[in-house]
Amino acid sequence: MSKLILRKNILIRAKKVKLLLMDCDGVLTDGRLYFSEQGEHLKVFNVKDGQGLALWHKAGFRSGIISGRNAEEILKKRATEIGMHYIKACSLDKIRDFEDILKKEGLTAQEVAFVGDDIGDIGLMQKVGFPIAVADAVKEVKFNAVYKTKVNGGHGAIREVTDLLLKAKKSAV
């Protein structure tokens, strides 16, 4: 398949997206886990991702996190700060949580992008219209992705995605 056809397929899918969902660890963060002496979880977020999400929201679109890890308080603080709409932490069934969000939003799966990095994300990636893998995702996730970011998770990958989605909205495809 030529690069032009592949690029057009990406833009067509991206243009349909109204809701951007993502995993947290390895996508919004670099995947490393930090613990204090008191056992507190600490996460490092990239400000560029936050700015990209702010631009996405300003354009009238919505976003959320579906994460298998239990870091709800940290996620709520960051998500609230940047105006995210959904936080599903400690998810035991990402597909069920996704379907709940779809019902609330009144959207089809084709109108959703999901960004993942590890095998727990594959099932959900297979459900959405625009599955995305961060550059340092495991090979099985990359295999299930339509788009792969140029940068690693936690290093501006979400900003790259929001820029792509917003550019697609303006394209003539």
Image (cartoon, rainbow, N blue to C red):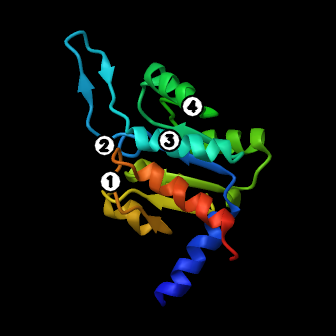
Compared across the picture, whether 160 is left or right of 166 comes to left
Q: Earlier in the sequence, mark 1 or mark 2?
A: 2
Marks 1 & 4, CB-CB < 8 Å contact:
no
Q: Secondary structure at mark 2?
A: loop
Find disc 4 in the rendering and name its residue.
Answer: 87
Q: Secondary structure at mark 1?
A: loop
* 106, above or below 82, in the image: below
* 25, above or below 139, in the image: above
Marks 1 & 2, CB-CB < 8 Å contact:
yes
Compared across the picture, whether 134 is left or right of 77 comes to left
Residue 61: image location, x then y, percent: 69, 46
Residue 51: assigned label:
3
**Is residue 40 in sight in this rendering?**
yes
Q: Earlier in the sequence, mark 3 or mark 4?
A: 3
Q: Considering depth in this image, is 76 or 140 the residue closer to the camera? A: 76
Compared across the picture, whether 116 is left or right of 10 comes to left
CA gap between label 3 and label 4 equals: 18 Å
CA gap between label 3 and label 2 equals: 17 Å
Find disc 1 in the rendering and name its residue.
Answer: 152
Find disc 2 in the rendering and name its residue.
Answer: 30
Q: Amino acid under label 2?
A: Asp
Q: Quadrant of residue 41?
A: top left
Residue 92: image location, x then y, percent: 50, 35
Marks 3 & 2, CB-CB < 8 Å contact:
no
Question: How would you rate the neighbour count of disc 2 (Cα within 10 Å): few for under 14, some for 14-19, many for 20 or more?
Answer: many
Q: Residue at x 66, y 71 (%)?
A: 171
